[in-house]
Image: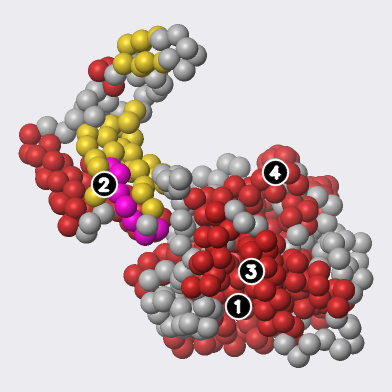
Amino acid sequence: MTQYMLSVIHDPDQAMPEGDDLMQLFADVDAVNQDIKAAGQWVFGGGLEHPNSATVVNSAGGKVTVTDGPYVETKEQLGGFWVVELPDLDAALKLAERASAACRNAIEVRPFQPEPEI
Amino acid sequence: MASGAGTSNDAIARVFREEYGRCVSTLTRVLGDITLAEDAVAEAFAVAVSNWDPDDLPPNPGGWITTTARRRAIDRLRREATRDARHAEAALLHGNDDEPPEEVGPVQDDRLRMLFTCCHPALAPEARVALTLRLLGGLETPDIARAFLVPEPTLAQRIVRAKKKIAEARIPYRVPVDADLPERLAGVLAVVYLIYNAGHTSPSGDSLHRVELCDEAVRLARLLVELMPDEPEAVGLLALLLLLESRRPARTAADGSLVLLPDQDRSLWRGDLISEGQSLVRACLRRNRPGPYQIQAAINAVHADTVDGSPTDWRSIVVLYDQLMAVAPTPVVALNRAVALAELDGPNVALAEIERLDLPDYQPHWVARAEMLVRCGRPVEARAAFDHALSLTENAVEHAYLTRRRAEI
């Protein structure tokens, strides 16, 4: 089994659906979540707050810097993600197809590195 | 073998051409890793080159190579005491290649698994072509690079990256389940057709054809039909390629210049390929599950009927293009339909159709436009259209042909 990250590629400044449309979106995403859990594929997942709420901390150079805002200033940001455990890429692409329709955004599928054995 | 050991050894080179794809495909299933499989098969061929008597090959050379490659791979994994290798060895010992495969569906040939893996939609299109030629055709990286006029390091990197993605993202080594098969098969057929087209009119360079790509595409199409005989579009693609191949000897004159269909010497057309292609088209018609490749094959079957000197049945061709437009309504199909329509309704009608199409960078569009303008008696615009076509032409033979046509106005 391989763990995959399904990232929701989202433009945070794009208008969200409203009213019934928004309720439908929530219901669709919830249905996907329930199915992932029922299939025993769920590792973790959730939606993220607006990128404006992000803070970048960098102490890689020894000195600590703290900066307001997201690290990469692009139009599209990470809007949320699922981490799922699946047998292969075909299964991941299939799930991504459903997830993308449910959350009305593109999904990037990326495998995790296998855990190093110690 | 295109390079390396055995170049002078025709018998072993032939075994390599015929068996390489099968050996690597089987070893990939057994070892669970494409690169390991390639290395093992290369090693086995090296052993064959030094041990085989070219006049007395083993009775089953492919089986010999596969067995030798497998033993060598096991030996190597035992020698290399890394953790990864122990894993692979465990997989090797547990995975017995005599066991029936776990796949759903009737197909069990490893080469089919390899084809679907190489043509996986998660790989970049140019990587699909390169991997297919490398792993199933056994073409060497420099040869593929030359055929596609890509720098060798670029192509080598493309192949390495694709193999890495297959391993890291876990692109499965299997034939897709029935529900996914039509879409995935269409992707495989597209790669084979792309390989043929690159061979039929080389994207650039001094010669019109890249024969090794044409040959390889036909071989792959034959393989697909052999492995999936009930897929009408696979049969359609094979028929289409055979019928295009049948005319290839007439497509260049003795001096290497381009000769288009109406002017071709019919006696140079290959009757064996025509009859094979036409009988496949008839089989498709009986099956009555038409698709784009089958219809294109049928169009070429109508052209092939002129081999005996009889006139082209343009009405049938236009009807077939109408069918093709119904299943694949692309501007390129519309362009080809318009060119055929000129033979029924005249160049003015065809030109009006052509001018409506949005194909600004498609060279054949400008060639067709130029030819129709010539026939409509509008030489100034025709020359301009030829100039535009020439600016989009990188193949030297095509360039010379268009320059000549322009001068003839």
Q: Disc 2 marks which residue?
A: A43
Kindly identify which chain the residue marked by label 4 belongs to.
B
Report the residue at 46% width, 56% height from top: B170
Give the amino acid type for the residue marked by disc 2 in the picture. Answer: Val
Can see residue B366?
no
Report the residue at 12% width, 37% height from top: A22
Instruction: Give the camera-side residue of B94 and B101.
Output: B94
Residue bounds of the magenta highlight = A82-88
Quadrant that contains the N terminus of chain B: bottom right
Instruction: Give the camera-side residue of A5 and B325.
Output: A5
Which label number is shown at residue B74? 3
| Badge 1 vs badge 3, beta-carbon distance below 8 Å | no
Give residue B105's quadrant in the image: bottom left
Give residue B253's quadrant in the image: bottom right
Q: CA distance from mark 2 to mark 4?
A: 38 Å
Report the residue at 9% width, 39% height from top: A23
Q: CA distance from mark 1 to mark 2?
A: 42 Å
Q: Disc 1 marks which residue?
A: B223
Kindly identify which chain the residue marked by label 2 belongs to.
A
